[in-house]
Structures are given as C-alpha cells and as structure tokens.
Image (cartoon, rainbow, N blue to C red):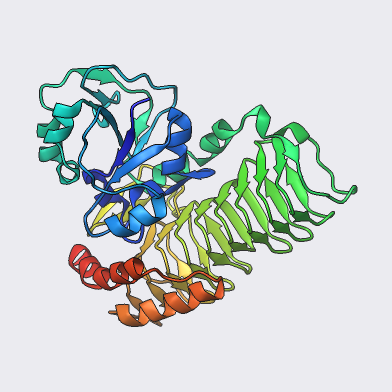
Amino acid sequence: MRPLVLFEDHGLENLLPMVYWRSVFELRIGRKIILDRIAQRLGAPVAGIWTRDWIAPVAAQRCGAPANKRITEPTILINGRWMPDAPAEFPAEPCVGRTEDGQIAFIVCDERLGAEIAARDMLTRPREERAVHGLPVHQAPGRVFSFLWELIADLPGILRAEWNAGDAGIHSDLDPDLRIDQPDHFHVGERTRIHRNAVLDTSNGPIFISDDVSIGPFVVVEGPSYIGPGTRINPHAWLHGATAIGPNCRVGGEVCNSVICGYSNKQHHGFLGHAYVGSWVNIGAGATNSNLKNTYGTVRVPINGKEVDSGQRFFGAIIGDHAKIGINAAVPTGAVLGLAASVASTGPIPKFVPSFGWVRGESLLSGDHLRALDVAAEVMARRNVELTDDEVELFLDLGDRARHIES
C-alpha cells in the first residue's frame, strides 16, 4: 500500500470553532477520530498530515505523524473530511477521486505530481482545483461531509455500521444480576464496573463500553452507543438516540444523539440533545439546550458570521473546546459557543458566543485569552494532563486569530 497522507482543505472553515484547537483529523466520528477511522477503513497507517501552518506542530504531536512534509514517493492524499462507505480502490496512475457531488476525496500522486503540490494548496478551492486540473477522475465511494450537524444526523447509522460480530464480548466481571438481552450486540472492556440496576438496551443498536468505565445505578443506556475508556456515567443518567462519548468524560442527566469529545464534564441533571461537544468542556448543573424549534422548522446555525440552514429539524448546539457553561443556562436551538467561551447566566444565552467571550447575565463581553489559558492549564492538571509548549503557543495565537475570523 502506498503511504497515506491526510490533508485539510478549504472546507475546514465550516467546522469552526471545533477546529481551532484540533486538526480536522482529530474530530470524533462515532467510536473513532477521523485519523484512526480512515486508517482502519483503508487498511493502512497514516504516514503524514497536511494542515494549517499555525496548528501543524500540535497536530503532528497528537496525530503521531509528520506535518506538511513534501511528497517524495508515490503517495495517496486523503481528504480528512472524506467518509468512504465502501472499500476504496486506488488506481496505479495519478488521478483525482471525486464523490458523486464532485468533491475531492483523494488524489493519487506519483513523484512528479507530489513535487508540484503543497499543503497550502489544499486550503483554498482555486489552488486545490489547479493542483488537480487535467487529472483523470476516479469515482470515490461515500461522501465528503461539510458541517458538524451532518455527523450528528448520521450518528445512529455510523455507530451501527462500525459494529462487527467480533466486537461482541464481556471482558470484566459483571454482577450476575445485570440483565443483558442481546450479548451479541454488547461489548464491555477490561476493568469496567456496571451496577446491577443499570439498564443496557441493545434493541435499537449495539452498545460498546470501553475499558475502565464506571456506570452507576439506575443508568439507562440505549444503543447504538459508544462510551470511551475511563468515562464515568453517573447514577440515573439516560443516554439515548445514539451517543458517542470520548475518553475520560463525566456524564449525568439526559443525553440524546450527541458526540462528547474527551475529558469533558456534564456531571449533573439537564438535557443535552443533538449536540457536538468539544474537549475539556464543563456543563453545569441544570444547564439545558434546545434541539427543536417551536415551529418544527429546520434549524439555522451561525457559521462564520452568517446563519446557515442546517436542513435538520433536530439540532442542538456546537460547543467549542474548553467552553464553560454555568448552572441553569438555557442554550438556544442551533447555538454555537466558541473556543473557551464562558457562560454565567440562568436564562437564555445568545445564539452565538464568540471564542473567549463571556456571557454574564444579559451581557456579552470580550474575554481574556490569557486568563482562559490559565483556566485551561488548571483544569487539565486536575486530570494529570499538561499543556505542551506547542499547545501553549497555539492557545496564545488563537486569541487574535479567532477574533479576526469571527469579527
């Protein structure tokens, strides 16, 4: 297999604010982040990544692959937003793979073509199209996603499709009184504890529970669901409609059809529905988001200064990394909270809270990214995670960068 190099393209702009603090390849889709998902689907490790210069050092560390290196051998460039739904075949000769709607899914490069293309060419549509001009077109299976709400809408199908018969198995000592109706749709990792009074319902899809998970009494988990390693599900929580929860999260209350990335807390009562939640987020007791308009119409979402019709009847919120939502806050339908946004309001909040912005009562104030960095460092230290020097530099850079993009 020729080396795989994942690339970001101009479409990442529609994935903000979730890709300020992470590369596109680190977005969670179902049980895996994109990098791991593509490597598994294509049956080959990722040899490199092409990303924005300003996030490249951090992305290289997290992805475990060199960033923005020139191609010196036959290589397959893979769009990080591509979601193949069938095995992909890559021709031997240079070509561009396009999905049915014409979006670029992959580029097969030889040494000559690779030498003519650089990571920055993928970040604007005109330069990307010039880079592949004249290449034969190959049909690519699946699609290239454009917005985060697509990942939420597709989450039930994604989680069901990720399951295979070999996943079934129980690798922890569970209470014999715990009822499991369909063990062939159930996975429990090692050192996991599940209270005997929990309800694990696989009638609508499989449930995959990772290692070192704790599930308290009277918890209801309805499949399809994924619960990442080290996560704790608090007593009386209800997870339904499809949920994908990353590693080391703390979850309580009601969660419906949502992705929660790693190290985030929603410990208490309150509703989270059809939402995409970043890492290191804290959602206070009683905080609730709306995922349905009173009119039952499609939800409009503020993306890069303009409202975009999602085409979805159900969509709750995008909550950026390191955001903090205080107790009893009311998050409106289709809201976007930026990187390190902070909310302290017991009533409705604005539909868009900019990165580092502070909501205090009815006021929306500009935040201090230096203070946000101090808070992030303290929060991460509580989980024995330390900011790297490159992450500190990125956080400092994002103070001005996010303000410029979002103004």
Q: Quadrant of residue 248?
A: bottom right
Along the line of sight, the residue nearer the viewer: 37 or 227? 37
**Residue at the image position 26 percent from the left and 25 percent from the top:** 98
**Residue at the image position 21 percent from the left and 55 percent from the top:** 53
Can the viewer see residue 345? no
Left or right of residue 4, residue 239 in this image: right
Along the line of sight, the residue nearer the viewer: 337 or 306? 337
Q: Quadrant of residue 293?
A: bottom left
Image location of residue 99, percent across then percent down: 30, 26
Left or right of residue 35, residue 49 in this image: left
Left or right of residue 272, residue 193 in this image: right
Left or right of residue 183, residue 266 in this image: left
Along the line of sight, the residue nearer the viewer: 144 or 229? 229
As drawn, the residue found furthest toward the right would be 177
Vertical relation: 114 (above or below) 353? above
How many labels sit on residues? Answer: 0
**Residue at the image position 74 percent from the left and 54 percent from the top:** 191
Vertical relation: 101 (above or below) 55? above
Image quadrant for the C terminus?
Answer: bottom left
Image quadrant for the N terminus?
Answer: top left
